[in-house]
Image (cartoon, rainbow, N blue to C red):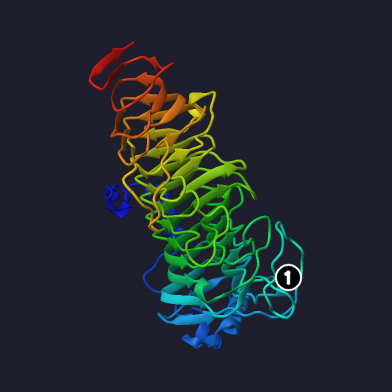
Amino acid sequence: MKISELVTRRSLIIAAGSATAGAMLASCADAKTPASAAFTPEAFGAKGDGTTDDTTAFQRLAAAVNANGGGEIVLRPVTYLVGRQEGVRGGYAFAPAALLALKDCRLPVVIWGNGGRLRCAPHLRFGTFDRRGDRHDHAMPFTFPGFSATPYEHMILVQGCRGPVQITDLELDGNIQQLRIGGPWGDTGWQIPAIGLFLSGNTGPVLVRNVFTHHHAQDGLMISAPSGSAPSRIENLRSAFNARQGCSFIGGSDFTFVGCRFTDTGRAKIGSAPGAGVDLEAESSPIRRLRFIDCEFARNEGVGMVADSGDTADVTFDQCRFMGDRNWAVWPNKPRFRFTHCQFVGSIVQCFDAADPAEGTMFTDCRFTDLLRRGADGKPLAPGPIADLSSARSTLFRRCTFTVSHGFALPWSLHAIYNSCSMHQSGGPMGYPRGIYRGTSTIVGKVDLYGSKIMGVVTINGQKRTA
């Protein structure tokens, strides 16, 4: 079974978060057509023919919008070729030209993509090179200035804006297949900016809808919002085949992601750690109150969703799908992560070790399986426990089902809480789902519950055990 075939609850999406979304959408002036005074790249010389370098036109367009304090940008359903390198500057051996950089706007900023595409020009350099343009290889880590190159730091940057921001119906193509790849830079991999869309330091509400950001040499999407910024919404975003992250969320609160897909990270020309679908890593400000609804995290070289550093808490996932075919499905090592009606293929690991059960990771009405025999690249999966909880305390599974049959084992735990769960294992190694059992649970398969505390009823291979 493909992950896209797993049961979803799309019908519940409209009601979820409707009050916040409604107010935010109204403030974004989400109309059907743009105002007549909108800015177009063609007015600044863009051709949009897929072969002419339109970099300068987008620079001039951005300067005009910034000077106006905001405005509406209207694209055509064509391909705008962008990206240019301008010699030695700012620590770069081959410095990137700025593209669509919108900064410090006090008025609304709206980008009507209309199905248009920004595509990185081919044959530009990314990685480390010497001044002659030849690839420069070296021992890692490597952070010396004067060797790095990138075709762009951000294809679109929206930074420090105080008014509403809206971006819709747009494709951002990093074209990594046709870049000239140099040596690595940073602590590991290629830690050089090459981001599709970067939302940085905006205090007004943000709406991103129907954006496809893919094949970037770093991240498809990066978000850094200050504490106290307005509630925002990312809807129907597709972020695929990016080298480092589908989405790096490094600070902010009250973002809702609906119907988004974060897939295939690290599976294009190069890959850099963490290689996740989504990485929640608080660097610029604390992360609080994120919500993911009907989202997919699949086929990434790294973890589907990872949260392991910085001040992060209070994140919920409703009706989401996680596939860990080459790595773990989720790594939620922060307080108060909640998963409801979610599907997991492959192992979950590193749930938060909470002395207080209210701080622990909670799974409600979730399904855990090892349905895939092989990953998207055809390689066999590395089996293990379907949930490897180590000694994490207070992880709660409420009305969850675990079904393993392809060499995986039932959960390995010591202090988990299983409330009315169902577990079934066909063959494979011994499972160790130890912890506290409440309600009525059923287990079929080879298991060892030594040290568990049964406070309800557990039926193990037909044998009933009670408190």
Q: Residue at x 50, y 63 (%)?
A: 242
> Image height check: is 231 above or below 462?
below
In the picture as drawn, the residue positioned furthest to the left comes out as 462
Viewer-nearest residue: 403 or 29: 403
Viewer-nearest residue: 324 or 314: 324
> Image height check: is 337 above or below 97?
above
In the picture as drawn, the residue positioned furthest to the top comes out as 467
Q: Residue at x 48, y 32 (%)?
A: 389
**Quadrant location, the C terminus:** top left
> Image height check: is 148 above or below 447?
below
One can see residue 334 in this view:
yes
- Badge 1: residue crowd in 10 Å (few <14, some 14–19, many ≥20): many
Badge count: 1
Find disc 1 in the rendering and name its residue: 147
* Residue 323 at x, y percent in the picture: 39, 49
Q: Quadrant of residue 383?
A: top left
Viewer-nearest residue: 181 or 36: 181
Q: Quadrant of residue 376?
A: bottom left
Instruction: Look at label 1 and name its amino acid.
Output: Phe
* Residue 46 at x, y percent in the picture: 52, 86
* Residue 359 at x, y percent in the picture: 51, 29
Q: Quadrant of residue 412?
A: top left
Viewer-nearest residue: 333 or 9: 333
